[in-house]
Image (spheres, rainbow, N blue to C red):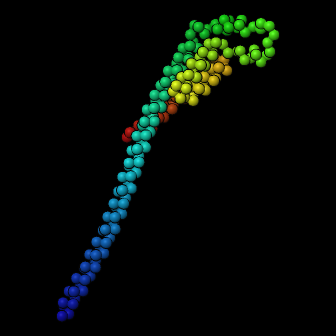
Amino acid sequence: IENAEHEVSKKEELRAEAKQYKAEQEGDRATTVSDKAEDEKYLEDMRAMCKLKSADFESRQQLRGEELEAIQKAIDILSSDEVSGAAEKHLPSMLQRGAKALAQLRASQATPLQERISSFLSERAKAIDSRLLSLVSQRVATDPFVKVKKLIKDLIVKLLEEATRETEHKGWCDA
């Protein structure tokens, strides 16, 4: 009898240990399933974010290309033969004919070419929804061409640097 009771108690201990082990394993499994679900959600979110950033990158690349094209056209216009010597051509038209106020003279300082370039850049800025081209357009209308050329060159450098940064980021996202 004593031996049988000892066997029963030993089996009960083994059974209790097995239940405890099973409970621990089920807890570990639940934690693992939960962690896996969180990781899958994170992966899905990252893929969606990278896809969105990739689409944004492509649209900015297209916008940047259009901006560079418009800026190149403006540079071509500024450096063309039509513009060189423009001061001699347009300065006589700025002479006073009759009594004009000083404010009227200041208002008419922009040459027709400047106005044409400004309106071209403004139209392109509206067409492609570009703040940068809009700013360049405003500067062309008010500043001498020297400052505009510097602004355009600075804008090109800025666009190229931004393109490099975005390309590096896109490479990270694609990897």
Question: Residue 168: where, in percent of width, then height?
Answer: 44, 36
The residue positioned 48% from the left and 31% from the top of the image is 60
Compared across the picture, whether 82 is left or right of 47 comes to right
Position of residue 44 relative to residue 52, above or below, is below
Residue 173 visible? The answer is: no
The quadrant in which residue 119 appears is top right
Q: How many marks?
A: 0
Position of residue 61 relative to residue 27, above or below, is above
Q: Which image quarter is the N terminus in?
A: bottom left
**Which of the two residues, 95 or 68, is positioned nearer the viewer here?**
95
Compared across the picture, whether 173 is left or right of 117 comes to left
Question: Residue 107: where, in percent of width, then height?
Answer: 72, 17
Question: Residue 44: where, in percent of width, then height?
Answer: 38, 48
The residue positioned 54% from the left and 28% from the top of the image is 130
The quadrant in which residue 20 appears is bottom left
The residue positioned 25% from the left and 83% from the top of the image is 12
Compared across the picture, whether 83 is left or right of 101 comes to left
Residue 171 visible? The answer is: yes
Position of residue 128 relative to residue 22, above or below, is above
**Which of the two residues, 58 or 118, is positioned nearer the viewer here?**
118
Compared across the picture, whether 105 is left or right of 26 comes to right
Q: Which image quarter is the C terminus in?
A: top left
* The residue positioned farthest toward the right in the image shown: 99
The residue positioned 64% from the left and 8% from the top of the image is 86
